[in-house]
Amino acid sequence: MATRTIDRAVVRRLEQAVGRDGVLWRPEELLAFEYDSTIEKALPQAVVFPTSARQVAEVVRIALAAGLPVVPRGAGTGLSGGAVATLGGVVVALTRMSRILEIDAANRLAVVEPGVVNLELSKAAEPYGLYYAPDPSSQRACTLGGNVAENAGGPHCLAYGVTTNHVLGLEVVLPDGAIAWLGGRARETPGYDLRGVFVGSEGTLGIVTKIVVRLLHQPEATRTLLAIFDEVDQASEAVSAIIGRGILPSALEMMDREVIRAVEPALHVGYPMDAGAVLLIEVDGLREAVAEQAAAIRQVCLDRGAREVREAEEAEERERLWAGRKGSISALGRLAPNYYVLDGVVPRTKLPQVLRKVYEMGERYGFPIANVFHAGDGNLHPNVLFDERRPGETERVLEVGAEIMRLCVDAGGSITGEHGVGYEKRSFMEWIFSEADLAAMSKVKAAFGSSELYNPCKLFPTGKGCGEVSQRKIERLMAQVGPDAYI
Amino acid sequence: MSSNALPGAVADLEPALRQILGDALAPGDAACAVDGLVPRLVAAPASVEQLAAALAAANEAGAAAIPWGGGRHMALGNIPARYDIALRTAKLDRVLEHEPADLTVTVEAGMTLGRLQALLAERGQFLPIDPPAGRADAPSDATIGGVLAAGVSGPSRHAYGLPRDWLLGCRVVQADGTVFKGGGRVVKNVAGYDLPKLLIGSLGTLGVIVEATFKVAPLPAAQETFLAAFPSLPPAADLAFAADERGLALRALALIHGPMSTALPEVPASGPEGALAAGWLAGPQAAVERTARELAGLAREAQTRRLEGQQSEGWWARLGEADAASEASVAVRASLPASAVAGFMERLAALGREAGVAVASLSHPTTGLVLARLDSGRDERLVSAIQEARRVAVEAGGCLVVTAAPVAIKERLDVWGDMGEALPLMRRLKEQLDPRGTLNPGRFVGGL
Ligand SMILES: Cc1cc2nc3c(=O)[nH]c(=O)nc-3n(C[C@H](O)[C@H](O)[C@H](O)COP(=O)(O)OP(=O)(O)OC[C@H]3O[C@@H](n4cnc5c(N)ncnc54)[C@H](O)[C@@H]3O)c2cc1C
């Protein structure tokens, strides 16, 4: 790949804006910013670390005046290539804007800078008996700014909602460098809900510089169950039966045989090696409510053929059950040198049939597929296990990935439930959106004053010079997020 | 926004619309008036295609169209700059998809909320959106599209959040007749921009919502109502926040201050400065029983009452009607940080006393929503009371919208208030989606 260089005069201007220690531009310094957690890579021409909204605005103006693309970046844990500088340009890294500015316990909200790591906010809120609900599995590493940009979810989003349900207000630097507040500290503001459309815009509409989020009370009681099934079909039917019965657990996660085979020998959490699938189910709330729900869930699982339903008696046991879930992705490394994480959604009632087809496809292509996912909301994460050193294998993995996405779409679902479209899935957008739908999105982008230079080649299916989705390299994930990260 | 309306072109519109709509086109009548303006024509298309074609023709001709759902929240908004055609959505009322086990439903947006709730109830489900009833003299009940466009919500927001948390996707007809959709039909989805969010509360200025997909919820196993009347507001507010703090099984918590409480049924007496705290208990039976016990413990100083069954349901429906403004009165809604709610309600009452304005207010305190009604024979008093109330709301970190007012009042203020730095962005959005200002011109923020 040709290395793009940067005009020294532009570097000087950037240095004037954020200080000399806030700009990287030598190629060797830029290497660490070539990736996010996907397979895309591209070298930016500079990486800038602003410390205030005004600096962000200044940097954006300088970059655009120089005709350079602008790419916002949080922790780089994204799983769709969103923070990769596909066409080069200036990466605006928000990691130095990492202060928790305020925890307003009376109003159960917090005001934070975008570089705050997700888990840090819940830790800071803990003394007040509060927590921040959206818990992406990368929460030890990913930033709240990145969560806003991707509208991130997590295991406990089933009952409490994803990022967009928790964001009240955003201070943003618009593509023209103007600073504006969208939303605020109250639950609603008059006018168009611009904060609503900004959440999940994947860094294409501007850069978030402050976030007002809601915090929730820690629940009085929590109960965690592990339901063990001989067949994956039984487990997925139990999922839709639980939801169909009107029970909404706070988490409802599934791990299949392949995942159990990886997890149990590594972590010894007590998942039976001969099980076809396990469901990890959690309910929380008032003691009386969770007791009733736990009993109902147990019954539904047994009715659907569960071999056994265990319940964690103590915190320690509960953590052990979760450790298996959280350690599942890193454990997959035991089964194959590489794995490719997919993210699709199907209506919950379609889970059994779609999962069956996913396995069939794996067989047809000759790849084992390990499924560990947010079953309660139909959000699949099939992991395709492969070895990139075998010639042609990566390409075939991408093919099976595309077929599985197509399967989700045909079942009435979506091409992404939480990881975003990014660079990776732009070409699938046309499967679910018509020309008119995409045109409406383009109009929104135009209204924000965004352009081809603003995080180019992301989210929209077409873009000048973006090329075909190709040149992929699938590896890692775990480096930044620690050994017990989970997806 | 500049108007491209040519009187000639608008005059030619009628035959064009007749061709598209046939009998579904009628002359304008007072039932479709907005702020006293009566449209020349009323169109009631029977399909999305028909609606799109009619709107495109209106747009082409430079005419102004106002989408009409049930007419319940038509008092909201500034006075229209122009108004040629009422575009009724009532015939778009089909269920397109309901898979109970998925807890999702897709309907056409002209369906009334009441009909959707009845349909869901048959399967033990409901959509936790329960907006105030709005104008009692409206031609029909509130429609899904109207409720979304008006951005209204009610008591259940305490436990269930806002309509924005339940709308998964929608289809929209743009002013030029283009039909687009945003979001999807599954409960989790981050593909593309979240366009449905933009439509909620947009008052039909970006497009006509013709179809909506919602997440729905199972009906709670047990429900009942707890009322506690106090001699003043602060202890009532304390009760509400204490109940919330304990995470009790409550679907709603409301505070009622001033004369509104006497208009409600079953309310224990509480004196002239009195206030009422109301809790809507909901959840598994055991959790509801415990909640009732704890509420009783918290309300020892109050006059209390428990309502069950139909009486309980009905009470919350009546609450939704209680804040409806009469023709002559003004209704406002303030959205505030929760901790500012009780103070704001007290400030409103004081303001009323100082200015000689009768004030009644109700709030959903945990989610910061205050609805108030202001009555006075003197317009200038009302205007200054509204402005003062808005100042207080803004100072507390919130905002205040006038949701209903006589034309004479609307002429003297912006019902939405100041949009700040976000206004240019909102203007550009409007220009992108409705460049000719065909939909609801003048009614939205900043004169959009
Ligand atoms: C092991 C692992 C587990 C994961 N589990 C989950 C999960 O359970 N749920 C889930 O939803 N995701 C998950 N992810 C994906 C990822 O962590 C999330 O998408 C996260 O929100 C990305 O945050 P980040 O700070 O790393 O953002 P980055 O990867 O740096 O950026 C992501 C996108 O956000 C934009 N962006 C970043 N900061 C800003 C800002 N301040 N303003 C505007 N745009 C900005 C970027 O341009 C890019 O488009 C997982 C990832 C890994 C590696």
Image (spheres, rainbow, N blue to C red):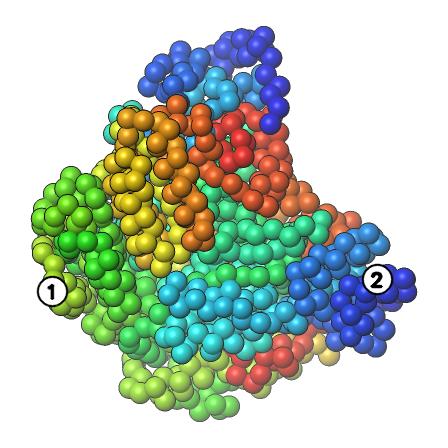
Near-viewer residue (B320 or B400): B400
- What amino acid is at disc 1? Arg
- Looking at the figure, which quarter contains the N terminus of chain A? bottom right
B307 and A360: which is toward the camera = B307
Q: Which residue is mark 2?
A: A13
Place of residue B163 in the rendered image (x, y in percent of width and height, measured from the top left): 39, 48
Instruction: Residue B87: tell me if it is visible.
Output: yes
Which residue is drawn at the image coordinates 15% and 53% (left, top)?
Answer: B231
State ligand 1's quadrant: bottom right
Residue B198 against residue B6 in the figure, above or below: below
Residue density around tag 1, few if under 14, some if 14–19, many if 20 or more, within 10 Å? few
Q: Is residue A159 above or below residue A177?
A: below
Q: Which mark is on residue B310?
A: none
Q: Is residue B172 left or right of residue B44?
A: right
In the displayed structure image, the side of residue A368 where residue A313 appears, left or right: left
Q: Report which residue position mark 1 lands on.
A: B300
Q: Are marks 2 and 1 in contact (CB under 8 Å)?
A: no
